[in-house]
Amino acid sequence: LKISYINTIATFLTRRCFEQALIDVGMHSLPVRLIGSGGGVVYAPLGCTHLANEDMALMRLIPNMAVVAPCDAEEMKRLMPATLQWPGPMYIRLAKGGDKVVSAPSMPFEIGKAIPLRSGREVLLLSTGVATQIALEAADCLSREDGVEAAVLHVHTVKPLDAAAIVEQASGARVVVTVEEHTLPGGFGSAVAEVLMERRNRRHVRFARVGFPDVFTGDYGSQSDILKKYGVCPAGVAGKVRELLGD
């Protein structure tokens, strides 16, 4: 049985052929790798028809479908050999290319296993894909300006989710914030919330999601402009943490 790799714009692989991905790939659990380029608002100059804000939500709905979002090009290189051994279908979400490299070969990569990138005590930032770069910058900002040391857990595999690592990292935190370049309904933050609620312990954790609200992000312009408009940026994440710490 051969492994098929398909690479095109993320909206084409998810919205436009959702039924084929579900029935022809997911239902038969075929070893197909759907590689979606331009996840999130990468194609901002082309408007909302080309923005893949809901791609991970759609793909994680499909039984048997894994969903992986590397944080940079170097991590993508470590992911690709691992895809050869994965038994079922997989959706891989890519950014625009040329993004800052924040991963390292010293951090073991395994599909389904989250990677701690920064240690901290009161605050835990959970992120996926290139939003991990935003989380790391937000953590640096909190450390520099507020003296708050935030842990950062890079969850490159949205499905199957590393529930054990999420629960363990969240167990000592007062504040947990998820960060994603994706719509909030059904996205990465929703997946984390499901885990924390289903496996909650006796401690109360203040929780929030940073991402796009339930709207069409229909602005034309740059990726950066749209991210900033909706607070999906280091300042927005840091502000959300300060808000929760102050409650």
Image (spheres, rainbow, N blue to C red):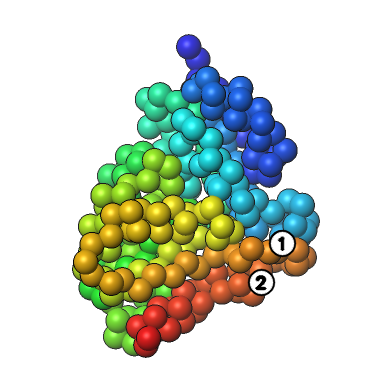
Give the foreground label among 1 and 2. Answer: 1
Q: Is residue 98 in view?
A: no
Between residue 237 and residue 245, name the one nearer to us: 245
Judged left or right of residue 120, residue 207 is: right
Using the image, determine if residue 9 lies above or below residue 186.
above
What residue does disc 2 label?
225
Between residue 102 and residue 207, name the one nearer to us: 207
Q: Is residue 214 in view?
A: yes
Q: Position of residue 21 (x, y in %)?
A: 61, 30
Residue at image coords 44%, 47%? 158
Judged left or right of residue 36, residue 159 is: left
**Which three-letter amino acid code belongs to the residue tagged 1?**
Phe
**Which three-letter amino acid code belongs to the residue tagged 2?**
Asp
Q: Where, by quadrant of the figure, is residue 199 drawn?
A: bottom left
Using the image, determine if residue 18 lies above or below residue 57.
above
Numbered disc 1: secondary structure: loop
Q: Position of residue 24 (x, y in %)?
A: 61, 22
Dot 2: within a 10 Å radius of its alpha carbon, few (fewer than 14), some, or many (20 or more) residues?
some
Using the image, determine if residue 80 lies above or below residue 115.
above
